[in-house]
Image (tube, grey):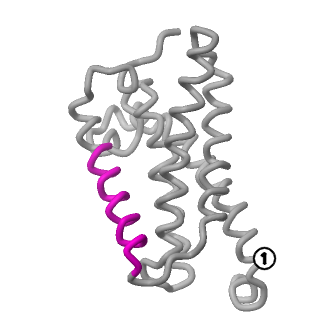
């Protein structure tokens, strides 16, 4: 079936990619929310999952599952790193920004945060991430934009590791007020 989808109908392949991606990132992100505690606060797990309730730590729930999904998808298609990876990085970055903007907008307006809205923001941001990835035109191989997106992914991974170990003392990296 997958070979038919990839060869026969590009629209079906895009729909499959989009729907399975949203499902994969939503399910894995939800599981990863609890992974650090479930592993007894494992140091390595904490580099890729939230170690506290800060907004920054929770953006890991979109970023890493989305990159993992894209790597899986490229292996399935037997392609190397291609422009689809760049689109996914841009989408993941948009998802991260969506979490931050939506959380601080609503909590700034009402003065506190509500767990139901926080959870909803995660799922809305996952969908937004895939819409951005889906709507971004493909970059040509070897294109400067593709190289920039790969650099952005590496910088984001480095930022997650550094700021997990040494969080700055600003609200983005602190536990939100209930």
Residue 23 is left or right of residue 139, and the answer is right
The residue lying at 32 percent from left, 43 percent from top is 160
Please name the residue that numbered disc 1 is placed on. Answer: 12
Label 1, residues with CA under 10 Å away: few <14, some 14-19, many ≥20: some
- Which percent across, then down, holds residue 152? 36, 58
| Extent of the magenta region | 143-160
Secondary structure at badge 1 equals: helix
Q: Nearer the viewer, residue 65 or 117?
A: 117
Q: Nearer the viewer, residue 54 or 35?
A: 54
On screen, 52 above or below 75? above
Question: As rendered, which of 150 and 137 lies closer to the eye?
Answer: 137
Choose top left, top right, bottom left or bottom right for residue 48: top left
Residue 60 image point, x, y percent: 44, 42
Taken as a whole, is the magenta stretch helix, strand or loop?
Answer: helix
The part of the image, by quadrant, that contains residue 111 is: top right
Please give left or right for residue 111 compared with residue 6 in the image. Answer: left
User: Relative to 178, is 54 on the left or the right?
Assistant: left
Q: What residue is rendered at 29% in x and 44% in y?
A: 159
In magenta stretch: residue 149: yes
Task: List x then y, in percent, for residue 164.
Answer: 28, 35
Which residue does the image show at 67% across and 24% down from the upper left?
A: 117
In x, y percent, where is residue 3? 69, 88
Residue found 42% across the figure and 72% down from its top: 146
Give the residue furthest to the front: 144
Name the residue at the bottom extreme. Answer: 7
């Amino acid at each position: 079936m997958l070979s038919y989808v990839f060869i026969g109908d590009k629209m079906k392949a895009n729909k499959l990619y989009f729907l399975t991606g949203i499902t994969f990132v939503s399910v894995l992100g939800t599981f990863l929310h609890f992974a650090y505690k479930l592993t007894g606060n494992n140091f390595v797990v904490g580099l890729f999952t939230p170690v506290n309730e800060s907004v920054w730590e929770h953006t890991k729930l979109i970023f890493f599952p989305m990159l993992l999904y894209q790597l899986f998808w490229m292996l399935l298609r037997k392609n190397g790193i291609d422009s689809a990876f760049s689109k996914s990085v841009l989408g993941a970055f948009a998802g991260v920004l969506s979490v931050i903007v939506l959380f601080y907008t609503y909590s700034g307006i009402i003065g506190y945060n509500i767990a139901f809205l926080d959870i909803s923001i995660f799922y809305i941001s996952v969908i937004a991430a895939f819409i951005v990835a889906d709507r971004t035109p493909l970059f040509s191989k070897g294109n400067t934009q593709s190289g920039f997106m790969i650099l952005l992914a590496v910088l984001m991974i480095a930022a997650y590791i550094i700021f997990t170990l040494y969080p700055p003392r600003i609200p983005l990296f602190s536990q939100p007020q209930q």
